[in-house]
Image (cartoon, rainbow, N blue to C red):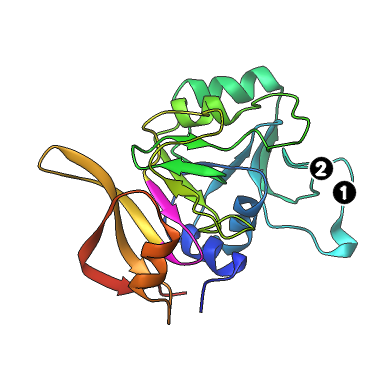
Amino acid sequence: MPLTRDQITKRAARELQDGFYVNLGIGMPTLVANHVPTGMQVWLQSENGLLGMGRFPYDDEVDADLINAGKQTVTAVPGASYFDGATSFAMIRGGHVDMAILGAMEISEAGDIANWMVPGKMVKGVGGAMDLVAGVKRVVVTMEHTTKKGGPKIIPMCTLPLTGKDCIDMIITDLCVMHRRERDGVKRFEVTEIAPDVTRDQIEQATSAQFWWSPDLKIVDV
């Protein structure tokens, strides 16, 4: 069966390392905060001015003034700090954030990402995603493999306005895990893990971009 949103973000949390500074994008990526491995210290950064974001609060822990960039209430871990937007973006643009985990509406086979303009909806601007994909050391995307209508989201070329070019290192979807790899001077995404009971045919039919299959293909362990 395809992975749930919780399983996708649990798999993404396995990419975290002790001492990492990590930015979580709006939407599905925020769930990663609930899956930080026990005993690991990871500093989650929210671009609206919080370093040290914790898991989502229980009802009796909600503080209406403590929110993430998506305006969801969050918790803060011991040692957390608060700061203005200029300081937040200085961290990102200065290369001080180790990883960003973002959502996406389209990803091209060249590693481009489009994740800020929702077709047919009023959008105020690109937000911080453009800075993140340019300034962060590693970019991981968590998303459903296809659109709500069943169309592919991993495609030959993005049709929506780009957030960044050639910047995605890893994709984790409900169907598989893909890493950006290079073979003989050519860079493509390579499927390294596949969701339980999902077939290769399903992934090939749901993906219009060219990609490789890993010779060491594994089942996603969640």
> At x 61% / y 28%, what residue is drawn?
128
Quick one: label 1, few (<14), some, or many (20+) residues within 10 Å?
few
Q: Which amino acid type is shown beneath numbered disc 2? A: Leu
Q: Is residue 50 above or below residue 148?
A: above
Q: Residue 62, position in %: x, y?
A: 87, 55
SS assignment at label 2: loop
Left or right: residue 184 versus residue 193 is left
| Residue 30 appearing in the image | yes
Marks 1/2: CA distance? 5 Å
Q: Residue 63, position in %: x, y?
A: 87, 49
Q: Residue 26, position in %: x, y?
A: 66, 44
Q: Magenta region: which residues?
A: 170-176
Q: Which residue is mark 1?
A: 63
Q: Residue 102, position in %: x, y?
A: 55, 44
Mark seen at residue 173: none
State the residue in front, 56 or 185: 185
Contact check, label 1 and label 2, Cβ < 8 Å: yes
User: Does residue 175 show up magenta in the picture?
Assistant: yes
Q: Which residue is mark 2?
A: 66
Q: Is residue 68 above or below residue 8?
A: above
Q: Which amino acid type is shown beneath numbered disc 1? A: Asp
